[in-house]
Image (cartoon, rainbow, N blue to C red):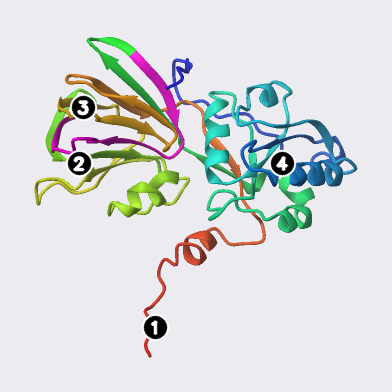
Amino acid sequence: MKKIVSPVGSRQQSPVATAPGSESTQTRRVYLLGNPDKKEVGAVLDEVRSFAASRCVVVGASLDRDARTAAATTPDRIIVLGGDGTLIGIARSMGEHQVPLIGVNVGKLGFLAEFSLDELKRHFDRAIADDSLISRRMVLQVTVRRDGAVKNSGLAINDCVIQAGPPFRIINLGISINGEHLTDVGGDGLIACTPSGSTAHNLSAGGPIMQPDVDAIILTPLNPHSLTHKPLVVDRESVIDIVASTVNEGTTAIIDGQVSCPLQLGDRVTVQQFPSDFLLVRNPQYPKWHNLMTKLHWGQSPTYE
């Protein structure tokens, strides 16, 4: 798990450009990033770079999931070519220096990466200039301590999942909020997620769906050995401590399904709000709840023969 040093103090609002239409799209600075593991992305990146060249200032383009070099060029937008996993990894790599991301789906579901290539071209000028399309979303900071010393620290765009792992016996986790012991839960683990992550592993585990720009943290037990442990939503100021009271050899804390940290008996996982927001540009072609309804089919009535 990569260690990320975060700023200290109150939550910071990551800087974005001024009101829509306050400057020509010709002066907007755009960086292009693509998933290097998808062979089709290289051709798409070249196509987008050619298309964008006459419409904005393209300050760089690369096949890379690390956005630190891109963020250093101070772009107004970063166009991400890949899938949701690519988008999440790039957002996490920027740390406190968040830049609004335009996700172009060259993957499967495309829940966060809302634009197809054709839709990006159709709405390009508005996507890079209209700041009302920017959705601000909570990010979590996850810190793992062992014997009081920091072992790992990182950011979660979606979630931190503590899973029992092999040999798959029940594990026990002690949960405290703001220093006050809340409960001990035995089962297969625990999910701590952002509202953006509420439609990921949390949804599969029976947790609540939340509007993405809500400031709250969701705690969802995984198969608890109890009828009384249900999902819980806590406020954004909460500092959540999770102590591994009983673990397996394979018990692991997993961030966004991409970064893993093995846990030992007595390890403490602290989850709290990160000072900077994840900034995602919405597709203006669709209403806010479009993906939930059309891609996850939420709220659809059953069909009858």
Q: Residue at x 69, y 44 (%)?
A: 41
Near mark 2 (Cα within 10 A), the count class, few <14, some 14-19 or many ≥20, is many
Q: Give the residue pinned by disc 3.
A: 249
Q: Give the residue pinned by disc 4.
A: 19
Dot 1 or dot 3, earlier in sequence: 3
Q: Residue at x 10, y 49 (%)?
A: 228
Kindly report which numbered mark, 1 or 3, lies closer to the viewer in this rendering: 3
Q: Give the residue pinned by disc 2.
A: 188
Mark 2 is on which residue type? Asp
Find residue 107 and report its horizontal and vertical position in percent: 59, 51
Near mark 3 (Cα within 10 A), the count class, few <14, some 14-19 or many ≥20, is some
Distance CA(mark 4)–CA(mark 1): 45 Å
The image quadrant of residue 154 is top left
* Magenta-colored stretch includes residue 153: yes
Mark 1 is on which residue type? Thr
* Magenta-colored stretch includes residue 160: yes
The image quadrant of residue 34 is top right
Distance CA(mark 3)–CA(mark 2): 13 Å
